[in-house]
Structures are given as C-alpha cells and as structure tokens.
Amino acid sequence: MLFRLKALYSLYNFFNKSKLKHNLPHYQKLGLKKKYYSPLSSIDFKNFKPDVLKPSNLNITPLNQTEIFKNSSPEDQNHFLDYSKNGYLILKNYLSNQSVNDVNLEIDNLLKTGKIKFVQRNKLMFVLKQSQLIKSIGEDLKLKKFLNSLLNDEAVLFQSINFITGSEQHTHSDSVHMTTFPLGGLLGVWVALEDITEENGPLHYYPGSHLLPYYLNPDYNNVGNKWLIGDKSYTEYEDMLETKVKEKNLQKLVFKANKGDLLIWHANLMHGGEPHINKNKTRKSMVFHYYAKHCICYHEIKQRPALIG
C-alpha cells in the first residue's frame, strides 16, 4: 500500500524542481492547475485537444532533407519514408566498429570502477551522465535532426539504458512507461553493440502496431483514486497486450542486428526482447529515449511527471 501513495511520489518530486520545471509552461498554457510535483496521468488530459501545445512557427527539417536521408541508398530512403506506416526504421551500420568498441570499453571501465551498477537485474541506467562518449552519440546533431523530422518536434534526450545481456522484456509499448501529452511524443533508439542472433535475445516488434489505440491505465482498470495509484500488477498490463496481439493478428518481426545497426521506433510500437537462449553469449546494446520538446512528459503507471536533466 505504501508504494501506491501519490503523496510519496509528490514528496520525492518536491525536491527535484530543476528536473520537473519543463512541464510548467505547458500546464500554464493548458490552464491546468498543477504544481511541478503534482501527480499526473492520462485522465488529466481527456478534455484537451492534442495540438494545443505545439507552436505554429516550429521549423523542422523535412525527413528527405536531413543529412542521414540524403546519404542513404534509395532502398533505405524508401524504408525511411514508410516509417509512418510501419512505426519503425533501421539505420544499417550507423556506428562504426571502432565507435562500438569504444562504447563497450567505456562500459567495461565504468563497471570496474563502480561508477555504474546494474538495476532491475540487467539494466545500466543513465550511463550518459557518467560518459561523455555515450552522451555525444545520443546528442549527435545529424541523428537529432533525423529524429526531429520523425517527431515533427525538437527531440530532447531523456535517458540511456545499456545492456550486457538480453532484456527478455515482454511485449509492451513505451507509452505506458514514458507517456506524453499529446500522445506519441517519444522515440526509442536502440543500437546493437555486437552482432545479435536468435541465441542472445534479439528485439522483436510488431510493424504497424503503433497505429492501434494507446493502451493506458484506464484500459486495464489501473486508474486508482485521488490518493492512490492503481493496484494492478505490471503482469496484468502485459497480459492485456498479449490479448491485443492475438485479437489483431499482429505479425512479429525479430531484429537480428549487425554490430553498429540502429533501430528507431515510435512511442506506441509494441516491442520486446526475445529469450536469451545461449547464456555463454553477451547481448551488448544501448537504448536512448527522446521526448518531444513541446509535450508534457510523465509516467502513466506511477502517475508522476518525468524527471529530465
């Protein structure tokens, strides 16, 4: 019961104003009576139009004018242009072998010195705060301009996650974890830091699933009340998505990536990690998540605003 108390999260947020002030101008524009530390969920936005926060003079380079697009093959360009239909795209050989080797060496050194540690079994969270190298990859201007065109907004780097083994995470949408108003203001970017096969836990995803409704707390009776967040387990959310996959007859693809390949996915694309079968093999990878600048950013399940910075 203790960890369901909204007041507990609000107390923690109270001491993190510098990382939560990004939402305040948006609250003001909406006329939403929220403090920077206030609980937040999709219920708060049910009466607002989705385009109300984005400025009319936003200058975003069109996808086909970005440097990454221009330097890609016609085949890859066609793949990029299908992003709105598929909800994902792949940049082959995005990072050089040397860049990948440098990242892996950086991770090894940070682990040895104790500057980073595993959480939630196998995640290395926010390594970009300890590594200028990893931060520079996530903040690369060519990549950011490419992401801006997909978001139709300015992409703001929110977090990094590094893995040594497969995530083995069940099918999910990032939008229930890293939620935005308007919905869809998030991108995931995954980089293979070695060759990935069916043995060491490749990613899976369901093309076109981003066009389905956003399944949030109300969809599995996890709204809670004024004082408490919902009491449903995360397993119940996963079970709901598994049912949706079967109902919609979605077709799964598995990404057997080469070292240096990069995958970008839409906020609502259903995806996860396949079983890591061969435990003698690593599955080194790196994930970045980006919010759209002109969005309110929060975490739907725990009903709290997102810390950025």
Image (tube, rainbow, N blue to C red):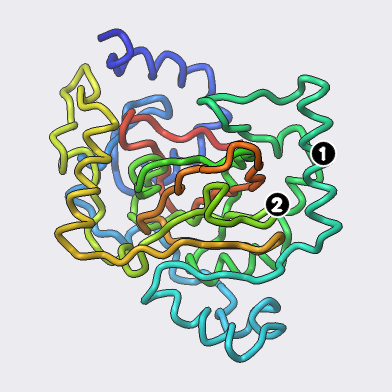
> Relative to 183, is 228 above or below?
above
- Residue 286 in percent (x, y) is at 64, 47
Going by the image, does 302 lie left or right of 97? left
Circle 1 is placed at which residue position? Answer: 106
**Quarter of the image that includes the N terminus:** top left
Q: Which residue shows up at 73% across the image and 59% down it?
A: 140
Sooner in the amino-acid sequence: mark 1 or mark 2 = 1
Residue 60 point in image, percent of width and height: 56, 73
Residue 241: image location, x then y, percent: 24, 48
Q: Element at badge 1?
A: helix
Residue sitting at 35 percent across and 63 percent down? 252
Disc 2 marks which amino acid? Answer: Leu
Q: Amino acid at mark 1?
A: Glu
Question: Distance from label 1 to label 2 (Cα)?
Answer: 12 Å
Residue topped by disc 2: 193
Write down the quadrant of residue 44 in the picture: top left
Helix, strand or loop at label 2? It is loop
Rate crowding at label 2 as few (under 14), some (14 to 19) or many (20 or more) other CA atoms within 10 Å. Answer: many
